[in-house]
Image (cartoon, helix red, strand yellow):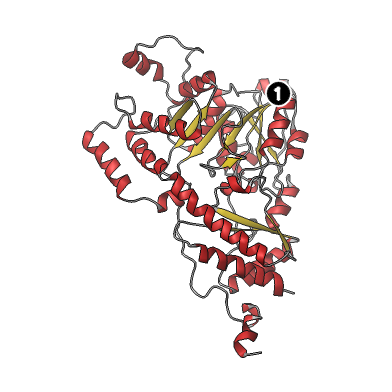
Amino acid sequence: MSVLETTRELLALDGGEKVISEPIPAFSGGPGADSIDDAEIAAITEVLRSKALFRHNPNSQVRAFERDACEVLGVQNGLMVNSGTSGLVCALFGLGIGPGDEVIVPAYTYIATAAAVVAVGAVPIIAEIDTSLGLDPVDVEQKITPRTKAIIPVYMQGVPGRIYDLLDVAKRHGLKVVEDCAQCIGGKYFGKMVGTLGDVGEWSFNYFKVLTCGEGGLVFTNDYEVFERACFASDPALPMWMKDQTGQTTWHTPPFSANCYRPSEIMGAMARVQLRKLEGILTHTRSLKAAFLEEIREGGTPRGFVLQHVDDPEGDCGVSAAIICHSSEMAKRYSEALRAEGLSCGTAHNAGFPDRHIYRYWDSVLEKASPHTTGYPWNDPHYLEQGGDVFYSPEMCPQSLDILNRALRFGFNMRMTTHHARLMARAITKVDRLLP
């Protein structure tokens, strides 16, 4: 055996040749941000030249985007707002969630999911995830109480979770389902767009998402009354604007005043351009993940890990892949060996690579910090009268912490080619084959 062949059969940690000799192309934002070009610049410039920046105008770019998005999603009603968090808040208002209610959220998501529950006066109940890295239907069912009114499944990193199982749990217990698709714009579940399977869905257009206009969000549903309430929640003056522009004075539900989450016409114009790029973005990211998974399969049955569970691989957005090692110690060893091979990674939950999407970092929620001296919503009289008394702790979801301590996640971006994706997989299969 030649020296070259010998070094190729050694881990880079042991002096072998690295699998990845040139850095994998990277980008700090999401696929949408990386796809920005002259089209977005032209659309925004046109709005600025018009000086019509308010969404309530006859030629509204925001309204045009809402119509375009509804057509893509195949739903009847869409409302653009100024952030993904605002979208969740409006969705919950739309469903009538409020004081005295509990809403189940996953242990692995951005704090915005839980914060939206608090914002409407309800109490977030944190449930375990499973190897899908989404809500565990078994634990969700165990967390249901007479106060539970809704579930918010979150499709992290572009991967739809166990949606049918969660919908079944919700149906049997008479619960509403808000699909948090902030990180899964364009994802599908056995041919249906995610966000359209539950009662109401939400997208986020934050800088790191599949589509972006810097910030922004979309609430969408086929239930007009839910939509109408979400609209009231997004703009306290909306009835006035509708009356002035259309003469509308009748409503399905009585108008109420809440917050103002109105987006600007600049956001709407940019979002319209981005939406036209969705198919191209997902075609590219899905090709990357397909190449990655094919290379993993060609490497044989893994010794030290399993792949993240995905109910419907074809519906996955393809923006990430995850392996789940058999132990946390093994995950750390794999991470070290992979970095030596040229593939940067770390476990999702450790001091060296903290993922801020884990409930342990939601200090304001775990500490029940309230802007009210009453301790609202946790000390809301209506909640206490119903026996509400939720307990939070950093260790309250041991299953989730165990999985996240063993999980290594790898992102795909618009600058990568399928060759890069295959190199990433080769590094993983080499480490899996050679690491003692």
Q: In which quadrant of the rendered view does residue 422 lie?
A: bottom right
The residue that mark 1 highlights is 174
Q: Residue at x 49, y 50 (%)?
A: 283
Coordinates of residue 316 in the picture (x, y in percent): 58, 47
Q: In which quadrant of the rendered view does residue 278 lie?
A: top left
Q: Residue at x 65, y 43 (%)?
A: 161
Coordinates of residue 187 in the picture (x, y in percent): 55, 42
Q: Please, what is the three-letter code of the amino acid marked with disc 1?
A: Gly
* Crowding at mark 1 (Cα within 10 Å: few <14, some 14-19, many 20+): few
Q: Is residue 258 visible?
A: no
User: Which of these two is toward me, 378 or 151?
Assistant: 151
- Is 130 left or right of 242, judged from the image as shown? right
Q: Give the quadrant of the C terminus.
A: bottom right
Q: Residue at x 57, y 77 (%)?
A: 18
Whether residue 183 is situated above or below residue 352 in the rendered picture: above
Residue extending furthest toward the bottom = 2
Q: How many marks?
A: 1
- Is 347 left or right of 49, judged from the image as shown? right
